[in-house]
Amino acid sequence: DNSAMMALIDFSRFQVELSVCDYDLSLQRKSTIALASILNSLEGIDEKIISAQQRFEFIQRIATLSTIDPFLVEINTARIRLLKLFSQNVGYQLPQVAGLIPIVCNSEPSCNIESSLKKDDAAYSPVSVPKLSRRGSVARCA
């Protein structure tokens, strides 16, 4: 589906732009940031649009082609930070609906991504990120 692909690209691009403003993320490998933003975006798109099977196959393909394990601690840490930056800049959290690549918060007690999502947050369309960028809004560095 073209709309799902565009949402995935737009969400991922926005998170990559946010990472430039964050010192800790700027020290990470580009591939780590790229994969973390793709995983967050993929998990943030409703399962009615991208099925669990399609997500799994997409993640497998990325892992095979890039030879990067999506379960690495570095990827998980970057995902958590990107989700927080997304929330701070957009005003709502990117829902992580699919749970194929779960976010583990063992080392960071303040990380409570799942429980902090409000039910209304899931109603937002992925189209909101491209609308922001088209209006000239860019990720704001804190």
Image: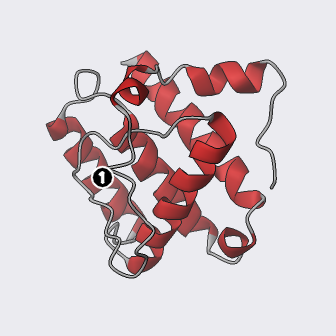
Of 36 and 99, nearer the camera is: 99
Percent position of residue 107, x then y: 39, 82
Amino acid type for the residue under numbered disc 1: Ile
Work out whether residue 90 or residue 9 is closer to the camera in this orientation and state it: 90
> Where does residue 76 sit, x and y in percent of width and height?
41, 69
Q: Which residue lies furthest to the left in this view?
A: 53
Q: Residue at x 30, y 52 (%)?
A: 59
Q: Label 1, secondary structure: give it.
A: helix
58 lies left or right of 113? left
Q: Is residue 107 above or below residue 2?
A: below
Neighbor class of circle 1 (other Cα within 10 Å; few <14, some 14-19, many 20+) is: many
Q: Is residue 10 left or right of residue 38?
A: right
Q: Residue, x 34% and y 66% (percent of image)?
A: 70
Q: Residue at x 59, y 45 (%)?
A: 86
Q: In which quarter of the image is the C terminus?
A: bottom right
Residue at 55% across / 37% down in the picture? 11
Q: In the rendered view, would you say 31 is above or below 27? A: above
Look at the picture and state if 73 lies above or below 120: below
Q: Mark 1 points at which residue?
A: 59
